[in-house]
Every structure is written in C-alpha cells, then in structure tokens.
Image (cartoon, rainbow, N blue to C red):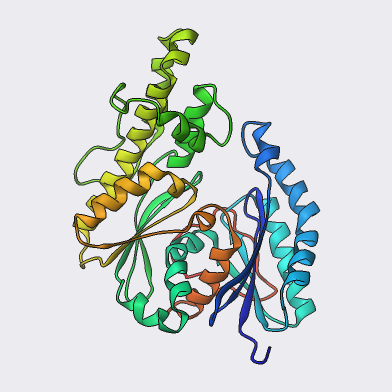
Amino acid sequence: MGLKRMILAIESSCDETALALFDPQRGLVGEWVHSQVVLHERHGGVVPDLATREHLRNLAPLLERARQTSDWSGISRVAVTYGPGLAACLAIGVAGAKALALALHVPVQGVNHLRGHVWSPFIPLHAAAPAQFEQRLHALLPHLGLIVSGGNTLLFTLDASRRITVLATTRDDAAGEALDKGAKLLGLGYPGGPLIEKLATGGRADAFDFPRGIGQRSELDFSFSGLKTSLRYLLEKMTIAEVQARLPDLCASYQQAVIDALVRKTVLGLERGSHPVRSVGLSGGVANNRLLRTRLEQGVQRQQIAFLPARPQHTGDNAGMIAFAAWAEAMGPDPLEEGMGLRIEPSLELTGRAH
C-alpha cells in the first residue's frame, strides 16, 4: 500500500460493536457493525451487563471479518472511543484497541464520542472531494452544531481554528431519553423514538398542548423532564381505551413538543452568535427523525445558511465518525489523548481538550 496513513477505529461506548477504516485520500473504505438492538428490545432498554457480554463476544469476530475483507497494510494508528459511555463497554473497546495497536506496531488514539458526533456531518463533504476538504471546510466555518441523542442534547460552535465551544446543554433529560421514556409511558417498545415517529404520522400534532421546556427567549439550554411529567399526568386522566384510540395524536403532539424545542433553541443559537455562522449541523441518533430534519432545514435555509445533517448510518453509535474525528482532530489546535496509558472516562464531556 506504500505510505501508512489509514486509521482503524473501534466504537463500543454502549450497545453497538463497530469498526471502521478511514483513508484521508479516499474516505471511509470499510465499516463493520454488530448491533444489539434486538437483544435490548426485549428488556425495554439497554442492559449494561448484557451489552458488555455482547461486546466481549463480538469484537474479536468483527475484527477478523474486517481483516479478511480489507487491506490493513496501510494502517497508521488505531482510534478508539474512550468516553463518554458505559464504563465496562468502553473498557472492552480500549483494551482491544491497545492490543491491536501493539500487534500492528502503531499508536493508539483516544477519541471523545461527542467529538465524533461533532465531525459526523462533515463526512459527506470529505467523501465528495477528499483533496478539497480543507478548503471546503474553511468555507463552512464558523459552524453551529446540534447533537441530539439518547444521552446528550447540546448546541456547540466549531470555529475557524477548529476549537469547539459548548453553547447549551440539557438541564435534565436528553431529547432521545425523553422520547424513549414517553414511548414507555405510552406502552410502546424500545427504542421509543422511531416508534413514536411512526405512529405520529397518522396523528395531529396540535391535538394536545405539551410544554416546550425552557421558554425564555434569552435561554439556550434545553429541558425535557417537564414534558415527560406532563404526559404522565395526562395519561393518568385517560382510560386505556382512550389512550389507544388517541395514540397517534398523543405521539404526534409529544414528538412535536420535542422538535419545537430543538428547532427554536438552534435558531436562537444562530441569532445569538458573536460571529456569523456559515453552516449548521445535525447529528446524534435522534437526527434520523425526518420531521426534525425537515423543520431544522427549513429554519436554517430561511437564514440562507448551509445545512449539514449527518448521514443516517453515522447518526447513532458508529465507528465511521470516530475514525473521521481522529483524523480531523489530529489537524486541530489541541493536544490529543494517545498512548498505552489511555484510560476510559465514562462521564467525559464536550469541553476542554480536543480528545
């Protein structure tokens, strides 16, 4: 293969065992995933012990499948998610990355899972023209990003020097968590977000008036705990038959409240920025919600700003974004966390150093 430049990435922060191979000159040349969704569906949510067991069972076979179906001779480093996430799940990925790095005689690099989400909307930009990526990226900075997942909801900016500044987070539940908890209250399965979205297509979004979180014009932070409580109190007043008859309306109204809050705060972030924003990104598992994508795109386009949603396969937990972030961060202004002394950080936040 010649000069070594490729990055092999491992992601195991929750319930997906994932690998990816990234070449700066070609983009993502391979992605391999073992999903645990069916397993955790039966339990109504992710069970940490079961997730850990599945990572132990599937990481080695997944690595072997990747090795047999791709050329590893050009690998220059192994990147791995080291936080945030479930501690035991992260530990398996980091241990595997260290062993692999030793076997390949290459360094290991830790990647902040949230920074993977930060960079995921830019993967299509690189794929379209790898040689022109730096120039095209510069034209889209400063960038405002919205990360929406089961564990995180936050707004951030990425400036021209590739420094990240967090503008707002959630004060309680994340948006994805609120959707999952709402689905559980409604007697639906797991994961709840896609099930609510499916049922909502046949309902009226104005049928029930749910709260929109922190409504003050000056506040950027999110809050979804009041929404969940409002749904619970409403359901306590309804019979089982009434709930079943109004299920599409309940789902549509509940989903609308979540999306209204996300879009309103993002647009407010655009207006509040000290420097003109040139692009807006959307990432995280909830970013697959079609109504959210449509509403946010409409709000962004009214400002005549580029909208960059992450590809569906790079919205949830995936190694493609980890590999890409490892490459993008290596050219940034901050030091990277790397070496065999790398330790997991389950409560890692999107602040400070670029690791």
Is 209 or 171 nearer to us in this picture?
209
Quarter of the image for the N terminus: give it: bottom right
Where residue 41 appears, as percent x and y from the top left, is 65, 34
Residue at 43% over, 15% down: 235
Q: Which of 300/238 is in front?
A: 300
Q: Could you tell me residue 77's position as x and y percent?
A: 65, 78
Residue at 41% in and 30% down = 200
- Which residue is at a point 70% across and 81% down the rendered structure image? 106
- 283 left or right of 265 in image: right
The picture places residue 14, in percent across and down from the top left corner, at 63, 49
Q: Which residue is most to the bottom?
A: 2
- Above or below 125: residue 317: above
User: Who's the residue at 58% across and 29% down the image?
Assistant: 189
Q: Is residue 46 visible?
A: yes
Q: In x, y percent, where is residue 289?
A: 43, 44
Q: Picture quarter containing residue 164?
A: bottom left
Total marks placed = 0
| Vertical comparison of 17 with 3: above or below | above
Work out whether 251 lies above or below 194. Answer: above
In this orientation, does residue 220 appear?
Answer: no
User: Looking at the image, which is closer to me, 6 or 68?
Assistant: 68
